[in-house]
Image (cartoon, rainbow, N blue to C red):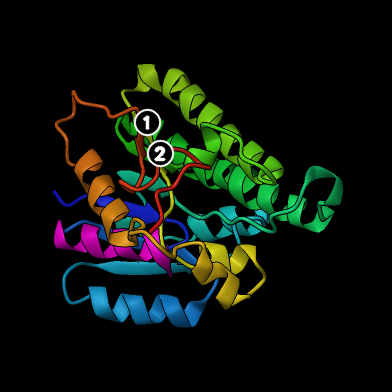
């Protein structure tokens, strides 16, 4: 029987690459994002390979999260794989110069939004005693770097939630694991720097960063392991990156 995978933040970057990778594995897809036009475009592309439905909502809106997931067609309601991918960084300021709106956005998206979506999906997995949850963390959830403060805190929270989920869902037979990417060339830096493309591009100059397809390949490997194998916590960095602050640039 085909598996059904729900991916948040599916319209760009790692989420979009994961949707494409999952389609090649013949997983039916629930694509979630905030831009209906981008969701429609990806649905048109991937519907040639698998069954696809879309949900357009902002994961910060708790009411909308539950409303949208409850609206899923019957054939998509039994979610086998949940990829909690949606997340953002906003600003790169010292704690004393931080913007509280940026803080709210990061905590609301990276932590609370992940929890809302998980809360909507987990009861069905528990009832079926089956499921696999992949939480997309970050190397920023393993070590704090200068001016990373609240973003790092939000990803440390994802690390803690991932561990807690694995403990709480153990008796239900649900696999839980995190994939924690280092420097990956997506729109991440463009969002962080408020659309300043020149500044964003400089982040990735002088070395080969990871690509969304690299992370999608790893996620696909993780979810395709035999049931008795759970990859609980995986950190991946480009070869040029030794830590959050040590990068070998030409």
The quadrant in which residue 63 appears is bottom right
Q: Quadrant of the C terminus?
A: bottom left
Which residues are drawn in magenta?
12-25
Residue 194 placed where, x, y %? 67, 70
Circles 1 and 2, Cβ within 8 Å, touching? The answer is no
| 10 Å crowding of disc 1: few (<14), some (14-19), many (20+) | many
Q: Is residue 183 left or right of residue 191?
A: left
The quadrant in which residue 22 appears is bottom left
Identify which residue is drawn at 42% across, 60% down: 72
**Image position of 177 with respect to 27: above or below:** above
Q: Nearer the viewer, mark 1 or mark 2?
A: 2
Q: Which residue is mark 2?
A: 242
Q: Is residue 32 left or right of residue 97?
A: left
**Helix, strand or loop under label 1:** strand
State the residue in front, 131 or 12.
12
Identify which residue is drawn at 17% across, 41% down: 224
**Image position of 15 with respect to 237: above or below:** below
Q: Main secondary structure of the magenta part?
A: helix
Residue 173 placed where, x, y %? 31, 23
Residue 220 placed where, x, y %? 23, 48
Disc number placed over residue 176 in the picture, else none: 1
């Amino acid at each position: 029987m085909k598996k059904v995978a729900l991916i948040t933040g599916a319209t760009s970057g790692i989420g979009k690459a994961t949707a494409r990778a999952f389609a090649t594995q013949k997983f039916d897809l629930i694509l979630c994002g905030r831009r209906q036009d981008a969701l429609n475009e990806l649905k048109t592309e991937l519907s040639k390979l698998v069954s696809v439905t879309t949900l357009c909502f902002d994961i910060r809106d708790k009411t909308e999260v539950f409303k949208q997931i409850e609206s899923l067609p019957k054939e998509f309601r039994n979610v086998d794989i949940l990829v909690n991918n949606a997340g953002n960084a906003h600003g790169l300021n010292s704690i004393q110069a931080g913007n509280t709106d940026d803080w709210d956005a990061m905590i609301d998206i990276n932590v609370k939004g992940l929890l809302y979506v998980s809360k909507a999906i987990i009861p069905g997995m528990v009832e079926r005693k089956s499921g696999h949850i992949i939480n997309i963390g970050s190397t920023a959830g393993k070590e704090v770097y200068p001016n990373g403060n609240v973003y790092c805190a939000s990803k440390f929270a994802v690390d803690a939630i991932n561990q807690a989920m694995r403990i709480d869902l153990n008796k239900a037979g649900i696999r839980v694991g995190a994939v924690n990417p280092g420097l990956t060339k997506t729109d991440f830096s463009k969002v962080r720097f408020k659309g300043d493309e020149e500044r964003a591009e400089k982040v990735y100059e002088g070395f080969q960063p990871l690509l969304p397809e690299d992370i999608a390949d790893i996620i696909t490997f993780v979810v395709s392991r035999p049931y008795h194998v759970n990859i609980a916590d995986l950190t991946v960095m480009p070869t040029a990156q030794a830590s959050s602050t040590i990068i070998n640039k030409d």
